[in-house]
Amino acid sequence: RKADIDYAEKRGMVCIMEGIKPRPGYNWITVDNAGAIQELVDHLHSLGRRKFGIFNVKLDYPWSAFEDRYAAAVARLRDLGISQRNIRTVTVQGSMSEKDPYVLTQRFFRAGRDIDALICPSDKIAVGAMRWMSEHGIKIPDDVAVTGFDNTLLSRFSTPPLTTADQDYFNSGRESVTQLVGLMNDYDNRRIQQTRKLKVIIRQSTIG
């Protein structure tokens, strides 16, 4: 919380925020959610996909990375000339349970199989969606190409393995500690404000 960071800084305790919305005037390290999602959208578009489904997640927080990922996906699709009628959105509201993505995936197919690509803001959502599709005769990636986000173990061992963006949590943590130690050794009000680029991992959920 902002109040906690302010409390710490007033007492000379150095803080770096990671995994939350960047704020001017504070130390933070974040990831380029928008850039990674745009790269995933471009990958799907390059494969000839033109009818997109996007999971939008609205959690019980004032901000989440899901918001950035959804907005970036919609913006990039519009830049590529995809019309609104070919962008179908399904929203997960509140605290997301294990079953939500699985249950909600059917909404993308109510008017028939009218999407050929599904953009998911996390691997967990993507795996739930793929399970529903596989149980309902929808072939991945032949009928629908699917992307996730995070490069968790789920993405590597899903069926099929999932195209996703690699958060690389290990290096993110290491970088945060390195920067924090540097600030502690030389705390002169300089600011660490860093956005990490993510690597897109292409797997069989999009290329067969």
Image (cartoon, rainbow, N blue to C red):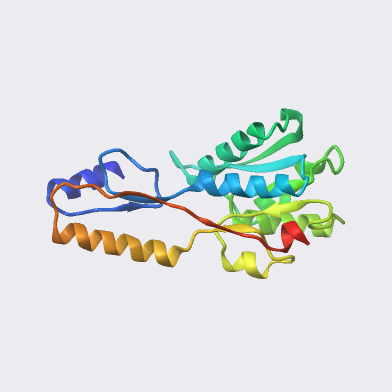
Q: Position of residue 111 (x, y in %)?
A: 85, 37
| 134 and 47: which is toward the camera | 47
Which residue reaches farthest front? 46
Q: Is residue 42 left or right of residue 170?
A: right
Q: Relative to 96, does residue 166 appear above or below in the rendering?
A: below
Where the N terminus falls, by quadrant? top left
Q: Is residue 182 left or right of residue 206?
A: left
Query: Residue at left 75%, top 49%?
Result: 47
Q: Position of residue 115 (x, y in %)?
A: 79, 42
Query: Residue at left 78%, top 45%?
Result: 48
Q: Position of residue 132 (x, y in %)?
A: 77, 55
Q: Is residue 104 visible?
A: no
| 93 and 31: which is toward the camera | 31
Q: Is residue 14 left or right of residue 162?
A: left
Q: Is residue 101 left or right of residue 17?
A: right
Where the C terminus falls, by quadrant? bottom right
**Number of marks in picture:** 0
Q: Relative to 120, does residue 161 appear above or below in the rendering?
A: below
Query: Residue at left 12%, top 52%?
Result: 12
Q: Position of residue 139 (x, y in %)?
A: 84, 57
| 10 and 151: which is toward the camera | 151
Q: Is residue 16 visible?
A: yes
Query: Residue at left 40%, top 61%?
Result: 172
